[in-house]
Amino acid sequence: MSLNRDRADTAFTFKGGMLPMTVMELASGDPERIRAQLAGKVSQAPAFFQHTPVVLGVEQLDEPHLALERICAVCRAHKLLPVAVRGGSDPIKQSAWALGLGWFPPQESRPRAVETRAVEAAAETELPVPPPEASVQAGGRIHRGTVRSGQQISASEGDLVVIGAVNPGAEVLAAGSVHVYGSLRGRALAGIHGDREAGIFCHDLHAELLSVAGTYKRLEDIDPKMLGCSVQVQLKEDQLRISALT
């Protein structure tokens, strides 16, 4: 009886967890410069900026003080939700706490991973290696290696080919299609300039967000039967269709 009463009185429990989170690495502390760049990003991928929580990374800034309140206001005006700050001086830490934000210590530097060769990646994924000439001629881009959390890889023209994995919290964008020769666990946005014929193709689907020409699906909206499969994502009748890649 006492055990049942204790459970009934419990309002919450603390649990450790690793949640996907986008890191916005600040190379400038000028709110107006940030506003101008965000406006361009929103026009490219409006679906991504729908109440997305972000951590403001300030490790690159050599400034003891920061207009943190104004920067947060700029982010919120563009539908981003600042939840914490990473790095910075003690005054920046105190400002974060005063604004109701969390604070993380600077990320420790780690040795750069050895770049994955295309032949090795293709052997692991059992998919053919895309011809580099195809993407270069189309004005696209090939990225070899893992796209890590907080990293963004984009192709402003043509397709983006990633020969490796896209980790949670990472983002890949392309004016054309996105091809991931590995596991897709971050965000993938194709047709960022409105190309409705673009698509997303990946070997192992676990994406946080999929978007084609501004129409998107989040992980919770994806049919569980498609998770872990090789798939293609295309826009048909204003809806994203996910089907097996054969």
Image: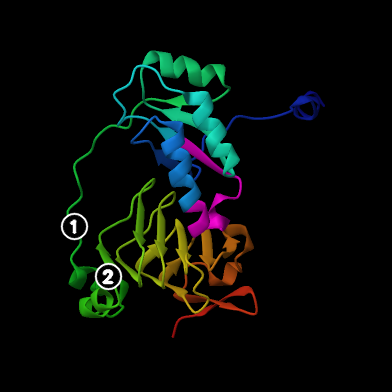
Q: Which amino acid, by three-letter code, is at mark 1?
A: Glu
Q: Nearer the viewer, residue 153 or 122?
A: 153
Q: Is residue 224 above or below residue 103?
A: below
Measured Cα–Cα span from mark 1 to mark 2: 15 Å
Q: Quadrant of the N terminus?
A: top right
Q: Secondary structure at mark 1?
A: loop
- Where does label 2 land, which residue? 124
- Where does label 1 land, which residue? 115
Q: Residue at the location (34% across, 28% down)? A: 106
x, y percentage for residue 210? 52, 63
Q: Quadrant of the C terminus?
A: bottom left
Viewed as shown, does residue 211 lie left or right of 183? right
Viewed as shown, does residue 38 lie left or right of 5? left
x, y percentage for residue 157? 35, 69
x, y percentage for residue 204? 42, 68
Q: Nearer the viewer, residue 153 or 77?
A: 77
Mark count:
2
Q: Which amino acid, by three-letter code, is at mark 2?
A: Glu
Q: Neighbour class for label 1 at 10 Å: few (<14), some, many (≥20)?
A: few
Viewed as shown, does residue 160 lie left or right of 129? right
Does the magenta run of residues contain 45? Answer: yes
Q: Secondary structure at mark 2?
A: helix
Q: Nearer the viewer, residue 145 or 195?
A: 195
x, y percentage for residue 11? 74, 28
Q: Is residue 193 above or below residue 9?
A: below
Of the two numbered discs 1 and 2 on the same chain, state the one appearing first in sequence: 1
Q: Which residues are magenta?
A: 41-55
